[in-house]
Amino acid sequence: MAAAQGQFSDHSDDAEGTTEGEGTSVPSAFRLAVDALRGTRLRPEIEVEPSRPPQRLAPYAYALEAAVVEGDEDLADGRLVLLHDPAGHDAWQGTFRLVTLVRAELEPEMAADPLLPEVSWSWLTGALEARSLPFEEASGTVTRAGSHYFGGLSDRRPATQIEIRASWTPREGRGGVPDTGAHLAAWCDLLCQIAGLPPSAPGPLDPGSAAVVSLPQRRGPQHP
């Protein structure tokens, strides 16, 4: 599969933002962080593609959407956004920030667990810790929502969806660049866990695993 070109956001008015060959003002630390995201090899169950980044959260942003797919069924989906402010941000305690939304439909027995919110949050922090990734200022919410169907939809069984919204500051390494590829891999571990897939050992994956590619718009996260 060919690597995706992706999209940067530098708050320009261009609908595509600043792309790979444009915009000499894009900081090298941010460009390297995005390159690491693009080059990360992921589990084959994960379909991931670049998406339009937010325009007002930080001077520079890059976004990905992903889905855990088994056959023709999406088991979980989510969005990961990399933000960068070269001047630093007091609330972040750094110059980079990762922001995510992850969601999945739950099995009834799991949905009824009163400790589900605490457990779900531990899946996020545990995914980062399992890959020995230092992070700071983690915050977020875990929401459990139930749906019951009536009338013409009454033949559907009740459903419960879990949604994790979170952000954290990745520790910066050489040249002020965090290991964004490893953070993406940890985020995908979270996606697979919330989807109910067995864990894979942290580390390099087989050559058949997926990279960040442009995919047909036949499935994936649908965000309001």
Image (cartoon, grey):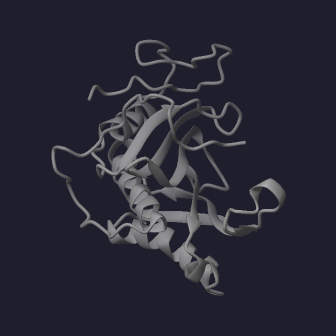
Whole-percent x and y of residue 89? 64, 48
* Residue 58 image position (x, y, % from top left): 64, 37
Task: Give the residue at x 52% y 51%.
Answer: 77
Name the one closer to the observer, 152 or 219.
152
Position of 58 relative to 143 (above/below):
above
Q: Is residue 44 left or right of residue 29?
A: left
Name the quadrant of the N terminus: top left
Which quarter of the figure has residue 118?
A: bottom right
Query: Is residue 177 visible in the rendered structure shown here?
Result: no
Quadrant in which residue 157 is drawn:
bottom right
Provide residue 183's location: percent of width, then percent of height: 40, 54
Q: Horizontal placement of 4 versus 78: left or right?
A: left
Q: Nearer the viewer, residue 152 or 88?
A: 152
Q: Position of residue 26 (x, y in %)?
A: 49, 24
Asked whether residue 25 appears in the rendered view, the answer is yes
Residue at x 32% of width, y 46% of height: 174
Residue drawn at 55 percent across, 59 percent down? 168
Q: Is residue 10 shown above or below 109?
A: above
